[in-house]
Amino acid sequence: MVKEVNNMKQLDAFVYFVRDLYKDCKHYVYPVFYILKRELKKLILKDKTYKALLFLEGDIVLGRLLYVFAYNDKLDIEVCYFSYLDCYDNQAVFNALFSYMEEDMKSLNVTYSEGTYAPYDPDNRRGVLIKGFEDDPVIFTSYNYSYYQSLFENYGYIKAHDTFSLELKKTDENVKKLNTLAKFFDRRFNIEVSPINLQDIDNEILDVHKILESATTEEIYQSAPSIEVIKAVAKNLKFFLEPKIILIAREKESKEPIGFVFCLLDYNQIFKKTKGRIKLLKLLRPLRHINRSRGLMQYVVPKYQNSGLIGYLYKKVYDSFEELGITAFEAGTMMENNLKPFKAMEKFGAEISKIYRIYGKEI
């Protein structure tokens, strides 16, 4: 039976379901449950902007699903976006959850659904993992069992987009290439690169938004997020920000922002050990145990695309990795049609390590 979540008891069941579902999975990383519950309480019970579903057999949860609909200006239609899909390998459970969502959407004249996407942040946890099951997920990426692909396809969902995570190995050859590029770039361009200034975050966000507006004009999958969305993401992630690996490039003379990279320390290495039971202050103690980073975003304005600026920025990031003790780096998730940064990073040894699929369906 499918039920909508409309009280705290049901919300608890929704949030904590993954503890049972993934209890025997050695790679799944539990979220910080109290943070997730706080966020979903606001979205589902307070603001009521999202709907959450549970599939129950008696009092036993067998599946869950979260969804919302919003206007997509690229498609020029209202789209149902779903996330937090988790269920056992049971086609009937999957079908019931999606059938309920689709009937609800059709009653509102929404005729297309797509996912998975994380709430309030289109660059995180997007897509269903279809390759890379043998590795732990890095921070703010998803992990799921391999049977999800069959569940989607058996129900009629098809590929809308694939997204890639890239693994960059720090070899002597790759470091040499980055050093050579940096020297060439310094001779050719009058550019300054600085860590993000968290004490002047509003102005830094304005520059980031300016870069995004320019850099995403040719991308077919999404428009540049609004300043409000960027601020919301910055607020939600503020505890995880390490300014040394969040860099903004500007022209020295004009101070015009031209590119940025946004990397995070892989706090999943801590979350995995604590199994979702953690208070934020305790995160300050074991940072020395984090040896992996995720490159969340990298954007360059058209004037400097194909100039080597992405490689130049990552050379600066790699310099900070030495100080921070980072020995492994995963970049992504990148949309499959976003070839410019992919090709740029491929030159420095990047290889596809994980593939996530965003599924779509006419409803």
Image (tube, rainbow, N blue to C red):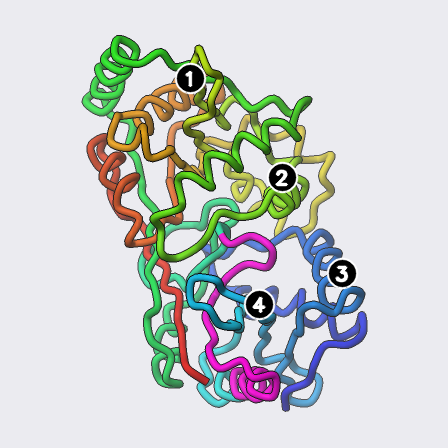
Determine contact: label 1, label 3, CB under 8 Å: no
Q: CA distance from mark 3 to mark 2?
A: 18 Å
Out of 310 and 149, give the one closest to the viewer: 310
Q: Is residue 317 left or right of residue 83?
A: left
How far is disc 2 from disc 4 in space, using C-alphas?
22 Å
Label 3 is placed on what type of residue? Answer: Lys
Circle nearer the viewer, 4 or 3 = 4
Label whose residue precedes the other's in the sequence (2 or 4):
4
Cβ atoms at labels 3 and 2 below 8 Å apart: no
Q: Which residues are magenta?
A: 97-122
Q: Secondary structure at mark 3?
A: helix
Viewer-side label of 2, 4:
4
Q: In the image, what residue type sits under mark 2?
A: Ala
Q: Which residue is mark 3?
A: 42
Residue indicated by mark 4: 70
Task: Kindly state the secondary structure of the residue where label 2 is placed.
Answer: helix
The numbered mark, 2 or 1, whose residue comes first in the sequence reads 2
**Where is residue 352 shown, x and y percent of the image?**
27, 47
Q: Is residue 133 visible?
A: no
